[in-house]
Image (cartoon, rainbow, N blue to C red):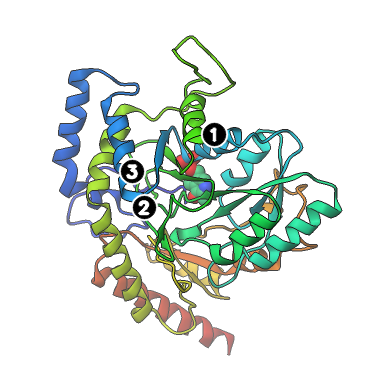
Amino acid sequence: MNQASAPTARPPAERRIDLIDLARQQAPIRARIEAAIARILDHGHYIMGPEVAELERRLAAFSGARHAVSCASGTDALVMALMALGLRPGDAVVVPSFTFCATAEAVMLLGGVPILADVREDTFNLDPASLKEAVLTARAQGLPLRGVITVDLFGQPCDYGAIEPIVRESGCWLVCDAAQAFGAEWNGRKVGTIGDITTTSFFPAKPLGCYGDGGALFTEHDETAEILRSLRVHGQGQDKYDNVRIGLNGRLDTIQAAILIEKLAVFEAEIAARNRVAVRYGKLLPPGLICPVLAAGATSVWAQFTVRTPDRDALLGRLRAQGLPAAVYYARPLHRQQAYRHCPCASEDLPTSDRLAGSVLSLPMHPYVTAEEQAHVADALGASSRELRGAAE
Ligand SMILES: *Cc1c(COP(=O)(O)O)cnc(C)c1O
């Protein structure tokens, strides 16, 4: 996911296709962003300026969440969520293995133990059956299980209808890592209103991205929101030099808040455009590539358009040779990574995470991909697939 294209304007003659084209997104709102930054240079409130509170009001209104608390990154959001929920060293938290590392990293930073669970092959999201196994594994190993972090991967929320009852029955809290899914919905509930705390990231390449690092947390609980606001400024109490808990420097810059206000204003239209791009891929891509599916009741903001194919490595090589972008999210699940290898797993192996790591391929996806560009990508994939099949015969 962490692959932002060069944000500088390119000469129009150069018709390069980008995986995520931030320059094309910037063009129509560039003047408004420049004006917003100029206002900050004039008022000079670089830290916690008025734009930060304004953005939080708008994020809460957009998501329907009672509280939106901005912070410095999606990773800080996860760390702050776990701190607010009182995670202590030795506490266990279920996390999917097929995700970006930050989900498990936040648990380990606080001394917790991630229990790595498997995902579903069709949606890439936490498999409720594996979550059940993880709960049993924690019990069998005598690990104090405190919580579950779900990841709404590639823009689509998890199957909360199956997950929420398991979380509740096991006495756990639920944090939704929606770094890739802010703006999506599950059964009419917007991301940000599911779980005890939802976290998101405004890394430039995420569906709603700023021009640096940024993140936010969402919660329905007044007390949790108050703790989060304290945590992001060193555990501040009543005033600046009153410290009531250990926190961090986790604030969102005023300039990034101002940029996000402008981006949020066009976000709804961009989500609609991303969905049109996804539908078009579904019609254009050659048979043999398995397209991503939306679960019943779920919408997606299509952070990635990720297909599956047994010929992944060969296809990736051929696309790249033609100068077409494609990427692999994620080539190694966490249980195969040096830093997480020793973590307990929900079951003896996590076969779906392993299989996905060898078969996923993410194609260019942003609101401004043209039908022509998609046809070009589809043609290249079709021709390469035919060649590969011919070579195999
Ligand atoms: C990007 C991402 C994060 C981390 O966000 P940053 O803003 O880069 O710290 C966490 N979880 C997931 C699933 C992500 O995709």
Determine whether 89 is above or below 238 in the image.
below
Furthest-front residue in this view: 222
Measure the alpha-carbon separation of dots 3 and 1.
18 Å
Determine whether 88 is above or below 313 in the image.
above
Q: Quadrant of residue 187?
A: bottom left
The disc placed on residue 80 is: 1
Q: Residue at x 15, y 39 (%)?
A: 32
Q: Which label sits in the foreground, 1 or 2?
A: 1
Residue 205 left/right relative to 276: right
Q: Earlier in the sequence, mark 2 or mark 3?
A: 3
How far across and how far down the image is residue 53, in percent?
Answer: 31, 31
Measure the alpha-carbon separation of dots 2 and 3.
14 Å
Give amino acid for label 1: Met
The disc placed on residue 32 is: none
Q: Quadrant of residue 144?
A: top right
Q: Mark yes or no: residue 333 visible.
A: no
Q: Residue at x 47, y 28 (%)?
A: 250
* Quadrant where the image shows the C terminus: bottom right
Determine whether 92 is above or below 183 in the image.
above
Identify the residue position indicated by label 3 in the image: 59
Whether label 1 touches label 2, CB < 8 Å: no
Identify the residue position indicated by label 2 in the image: 207
Furthest-top residue in this view: 241
Measure the alpha-carbon separation of dots 1 and 2.
22 Å
Give amino acid for label 3: Leu
Q: Secondary structure at mark 3?
A: helix
How far across and how far down the image is residue 193, in percent?
Answer: 44, 51
Q: Earlier in the sequence, mark 1 or mark 2?
A: 1
- Residue count near mark 1 (Cα–Cα under 10 Å), binned few <14, some 14–19, many ≥20: many
* Numbered disc total: 3
Q: Secondary structure at mark 2?
A: loop
Q: Nearer the viewer, residue 51 or 61?
A: 61
